[in-house]
Amino acid sequence: QVQLVESGGGVVQPGGSLRLSCAASGFTFTTYGMHWVRQAPGKGLEWVTFIRYDGSEKYYSDSVKGRFTISRDNSKHTLYLQMNSLRVEDTAVYYCAKEPYSGYDLYYFESWGQGTLLTVSS
Amino acid sequence: SYELTQPLSVSVALGQTATITCGGNSIGTKNVHWYQVKPGQAPMLVIYRDVNRPSGIPERFSGSNRENSGNTATLTISRAQAGDEADYYCQVWDSDIVIFGGGTKLTVL
């Protein structure tokens, strides 16, 4: 079955950088678009970014554009989120999530990982 | 930018029907998806493309989103159970971004 396992979270100072990873298994990773979605403590879901199955298209929310970069290594079945210039308001659980259909971008989330917590604090 | 509006909270008696709304301009022209989020757990898709249930989601969960519905999509949970108590989020895609509603806390009394 589909497994998405995030890692790389931790505590970072404001202005710092961190890279999150999402290891995928149980499906043909190379043919599915992927997203990062976050949830700040006590807050709602917030979409962060999307990458097409082949990396040819990427979209970002306004709140992270220019600071975060999504990428993927299809040979390693792994999704990444490089986060720079981190702010206190980036504190959240970060989930990777999978598109529902191979080769199509439908922009909703069929499967989710368990999340990894990022805390930005001095 | 496009916005989705949900009530902060909805209460339902055990065994009764809960209705959670999601308002947005011309929402009937968009595909609406719904997620259930329980504390400490990953979100779970419960309705996709307005009316469809993923495998494993009970028939008690249903969705609607008609163009003549007054700019409102709806998630309906029939015969509510204690295990349905959770936060529910609607979601659409618009202008190259994903948009979530603010979420509705469902309490089963």
Image (cartoon, grey):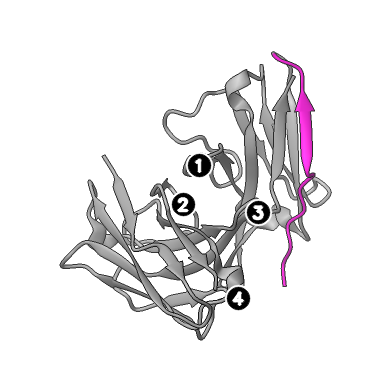
Mark nearer the viewer, 4 or 3: 3
Question: The disc labelled 4 sits on which kind of residue?
Answer: Ser
Is B81 on the left-hand or right-hand side of A53? right
Q: Are marks 1 and 2 on the same chain?
A: no
Q: Are marks 1 and 2 in contact (CB under 8 Å)?
A: yes
Which residue was labeled with disc 3?
A43
How many numbered dots are placed on residues in this image?
4
Q: Secondary structure at mark 2?
A: loop
For label 3, the crowd category at 10 Å Cα-Cα, with few meaning under 14, some 14 to 19 and many 20 or more, is few
- Chain identifier of the residue bearing label 2 in the image: A
For label 4, the crowd category at 10 Å Cα-Cα, with few meaning under 14, some 14 to 19 and many 20 or more, is few
Query: Which residue is farthest front?
Result: A122
Q: Secondary structure at mark 3?
A: loop
Q: Secondary structure at mark 4?
A: loop
Question: The disc labelled 1 sits on which kind of residue?
Answer: Leu
Query: Which residue is farthest left?
Result: A75
Quadrant in which the C terminus of chain A is drawn: bottom right
Which residue was labeled with disc 1?
B45
Q: Earlier in the sequence, mark 4 or mark 2?
A: 4
Which residue was labeled with disc 4?
A63
The residue at 61%/73% (across/down) is B95
Query: Which residue is farthest right?
Result: B70
B67 or A84: which is nearer to us? A84
Question: The disc labelled 2 sits on which kind of residue?
Answer: Phe
**Magenta residues?**
B1-14
